[in-house]
Amino acid sequence: MIRFECDYAEGAHPQIMQALIETNMEQTPGYSTDEHCACAREYIRKACEAPDAAVEFLVGGTQTNVTVISACLKPYQGALCAASGHINVHETGAMEAYGYKALTLESPDGKITAAQVKKAWEDHIHNASHEHMVQPGMVYISWPTECGTLYSKGELTAISEVCHEIGLKLFVDGARCGYGLAALGNDVTLADLAKLTDVFYIGGTKVGALFGEAVVITNPELQKDFRYYIKQHGGMLAKGRLLGIQFETLFRDGLYYEISRHAIDLAMQIRDAFMHCGVSFFFDSVTNQQFPILNAAQMEEFGKKYAFELWETVDEEHFAVRFCTSWATKEENVKALVEDIKRICE
Amino acid sequence: MIRFECDYAEGAHPQIMQALIETNMEQTPGYSTDEHCACAREYIRKACEAPDAAVEFLVGGTQTNVTVISACLKPYQGALCAASGHINVHETGAMEAYGYKALTLESPDGKITAAQVKKAWEDHIHNASHEHMVQPGMVYISWPTECGTLYSKGELTAISEVCHEIGLKLFVDGARCGYGLAALGNDVTLADLAKLTDVFYIGGTKVGALFGEAVVITNPELQKDFRYYIKQHGGMLAKGRLLGIQFETLFRDGLYYEISRHAIDLAMQIRDAFMHCGVSFFFDSVTNQQFPILNAAQMEEFGKKYAFELWETVDEEHFAVRFCTSWATKEENVKALVEDIKRICE
Amino acid sequence: MIRFECDYAEGAHPQIMQALIETNMEQTPGYSTDEHCACAREYIRKACEAPDAAVEFLVGGTQTNVTVISACLKPYQGALCAASGHINVHETGAMEAYGYKALTLESPDGKITAAQVKKAWEDHIHNASHEHMVQPGMVYISWPTECGTLYSKGELTAISEVCHEIGLKLFVDGARCGYGLAALGNDVTLADLAKLTDVFYIGGTKVGALFGEAVVITNPELQKDFRYYIKQHGGMLAKGRLLGIQFETLFRDGLYYEISRHAIDLAMQIRDAFMHCGVSFFFDSVTNQQFPILNAAQMEEFGKKYAFELWETVDEEHFAVRFCTSWATKEENVKALVEDIKRICE
Amino acid sequence: MIRFECDYAEGAHPQIMQALIETNMEQTPGYSTDEHCACAREYIRKACEAPDAAVEFLVGGTQTNVTVISACLKPYQGALCAASGHINVHETGAMEAYGYKALTLESPDGKITAAQVKKAWEDHIHNASHEHMVQPGMVYISWPTECGTLYSKGELTAISEVCHEIGLKLFVDGARCGYGLAALGNDVTLADLAKLTDVFYIGGTKVGALFGEAVVITNPELQKDFRYYIKQHGGMLAKGRLLGIQFETLFRDGLYYEISRHAIDLAMQIRDAFMHCGVSFFFDSVTNQQFPILNAAQMEEFGKKYAFELWETVDEEHFAVRFCTSWATKEENVKALVEDIKRICE
């Protein structure tokens, strides 16, 4: 079975494993107060052109999202997000468990717009009963989205401007950030993300690391006491240096970008193969997740050899599925898949 | 200005005020452990034909809803409800503040169906990622709904059966319960509510009392330690006897039903007047809230003399508004309104 | 049975009942946006010499405490308080249920000191692991305390100064505030409380009202959006005018002070009677709660005629008990008790 | 600088690093549903002689504690624990952030007794105001404790019996479990822990792993839906196989016990050296943490060469400090320390 069902099926990039081996018996203080974390923080600040940003490391995405949300919101506020947003759907109510409501906006492709944000705020504030309703306090977006789509720099800028005008905090979930940066046609940089948001994170788990997410906080108000939030949410890793060592490796010489491009190149080969056969797509994704719509016979045929995810039943005969590539995907496996696409779908 | 904009514009029914005056200098123990509460509990058990039910008193609806929800759900569970449900829209995220997610179902008229509940459960449990999603743990419905509509006994029975089959708790918010019981065509009794639900409440605030809601708990699992929840949620009134005295008065000789019928009679006069003039309605309500759709000129004209609520903008020229009656509405005021409806809308 | 076991055994002062009767059929908007609330707010601002204070009304003490605490603290902060503080002992963990830890300080008499507050802060901030510990964010004190004791103006000023120096918010629980103001030797006024705290409340439930607490917020940061907190905590009474009418009555002509003095006068008669007989006291209380230490035979003898509370078992033969007076206590009952004290304890 | 200040200063045992390297490019499903986790679960069940136990893996201790506590308690319940318990002191209020109060018991050495538990329960249940207080719902103990002390099998059995008699759940925090098992004089086995508790965990972070704690759940009620709790608390590692691989390695051939003994052997050498010089100890620890009391001159002298933790200031001249050994401590470093102890303290 060749697995394309997610982007976290393997361990870590060999350079990271090498770095962990080499540093294994070093003695360091705990909780990300060590030299490796300091160095990784510096690399990331440089990559983000944000010399005053605070950079903190957490283990996984759900933990990171809920920690950041807790720091952004007051108890009576909620987070505006796409109905398909990870925080609304796939975190077992982690944000609600800490007291915060997801304020969902409809979105066919996982993206929301500045206009939607503005309307949600105005609907709230002009409602005679607004004190009886959860007040929008922040905007959560994923970049890339859960649907593989990307906000352009113009779209992000528009959302950022609305947020700052209204007084909402803007948080970008970058679990697959690398795959956005490497996407064809993308015009957003890490420096843009740092400039346009109050806080965002650079995903490691899905982009080369064993685990780990690097939170970049540019809003000084959010920097204050942020580490208390991390500890309270169970996110302060005792051997924090493990996170430092991994991000140090990813950002020392551009490894993060390089392995992301690898994933995108392979994803585009898969995309092109499906398109060439006239297969349509559930989402128009330019990143490492591809969502072709298959019929039942095709599904079964692919299933004999490949693992992939059933995303949504389109109708009785058609099914949107997900194929993912990652830093670890082997070219030979994609070549085999492309051949089979031709065989099965043409 | 004659007020029809809500059903809590006045104080309490004169018989209740009288009872409060008469008992004012009695010395009783606190926290609803007094004789008046004991007596009110007994009246309500009898009215519900539920001799083993626990009956507890709280001050208001939001408090009651969140207290009951806390007792029903585990931390990773949520409450299935109509998107328009009070807990989802008008409680400033009270349930989320305690950790619970509202799992919303679409509904054009404020009602949800047994089939929707069943589908939501099956979608959850058959999802490969169900551990990553909030598990439905209960169903919340309002009777009457926020739209003035009513579930029939058949509809309630179907929901109840699905809930018991699946293992979901069923909670009915009866803030306007009296107006449901008195509605034309209603076939549901308090005994039915007690039998079909795990827990429901009989609203006092909107039906004759200064304040107060009587929670009727038939599920023994929910009875255990329920008073701890009340206290933790700030709902244990020191002078609990005030709640006992009010419900004693409402349920001693049928006052609750009598004043509810009064409100319904007057609401139907308003409804008939609008219908007679060809005005259409936003919801087809048989209870004390009526939602005619007015044009801008009509709105303005009514607004000179009456207070009512703008419910929703239908289009640029049409507006759904709400007129409420209550136990306290005066016949002369309805007569005047009916005359004005004829004048303005014909 | 003559009841001295608490200060909420009766209904409300007759003037309040009269006001509720007179206003009963007035139509007002809900949620404390009516004229009675506006008027009561104005009276209270005047009494507090705090023209810019926000004044909000809630139903009961536990609800008020948790609402204020939520507005004062960030999620990783806790409230410094006496170990005997109401929030730590008698609210079924209401503050923890909303996510906040009580940081307790030892206190033999229910009072804490400025020095204790300062030390707690410094111990925290100088601890190498402070990010792993709950940060003090506010100070909670009761005035009078649960032990009937009172902070002097000097003591309050010292605590206030330390709080402002460190950046902690100061909240005073004034559930029995009237009995503090009326106490012999007291040198604190409502204006002092307003000036020295960020937020405090004036208790109505135990001082003449059916129910109700008036929160006085002088810190502008806490004023912002405070009503969202009230609603979220289930504390926004639909018929809010009931709270306005009661506080209007209490503060129009000084009724609040007058009935408090009544309670203190009677409490001092009880105190003097016990002292005269050589009975010692568990706490040295100058307010409406008195805590004599009785032996088993005395307990039994008093128990035949009076209700009072067992506070704490001192040793096998001695028991601290509580006798309370209130605005409602009858002079003839105190006279009878004083006679019995002489008979039983001499 | 030679570091003895904690037991998480290095990476992981070389066999674990080797296993991670070897499995690095395997493709596995996520979230601990892979074969390595299945195998590790089986090894642990066998080690615990608990074939029906559920075994789940989390990343760190704070996360594990709060996840287990959430599964054990109802919202109005709290956890009885030593005042020095990790959940009460060093988790930034993680359990309170989820709504649960720590109910602390005094303890000079980090241990609590069955009698204390029983008394706490009876004090609660016999208190007339018990509904106004947090109800004990579970007992939390650490084994070894934060003070390095150990419960004997008799002591654990007594606590377990009281818990089952009353209906409290018993949870053992085994962050340093290996060092307890290997301690001189210890008579408790993993099988005992499994048998006597409802749930406990076997610490990996401090005993050879990069990170990871294995939760062993014998109470079927707690097994149900436990993975929802893990996900909600941000503890479900995407690449869960990392946890499986580590515990597989630790429990395949007894590596966990072997490396624990190593740490204990070295700790005892340090302990003996201090004792031999007449240095007294703050706690009488038989495990890998040793707490000698040094004077200022000694502190300074040791500080030139060794990192250790200041635990508590005993008086102006004396300081309790902590020296830790671990699976990674080098014999040569202990030899050097022992020499220096002789030099400095004799």
Image (cartoon, coloured by chain):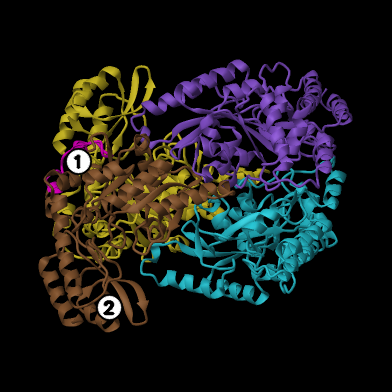
Chain colours: A yellow, B purple, C cyan, D brown
Residue picked out by circle 1: D40
Q: Quadrant of residue C183?
A: bottom right
Q: Of B123 and B314, which appears nearest the observer?
A: B123
What are the residue bounds of the magenta stretch?
D19-42
User: Which quarter of the image is occupied by the C terminus of chain C?
Assistant: bottom right
Q: Is residue D305 above or below residue B213?
A: below
> In the image, residue A279 lies at what x, y percent?
30, 24
> In the image, residue A186 lies at what x, y percent?
34, 46
Q: Of C92 and C267, which appears nearest the observer?
A: C267
Disc 1 is placed on an element classified as helix
At a point 48% along the width and 56% down the height, the residue shown is C75
Residue picked out by circle 2: D294
Within-10-Å neighbours for mark 1: few <14, some 14–19, many 20+: many
The number of discs equals 2
Nearer the observer, disc 1 or disc 2? 2
Residue D183 in view of the camera: yes
Q: Is residue C325 above or below residue D239?
A: below
Residue D71 in view of the camera: no
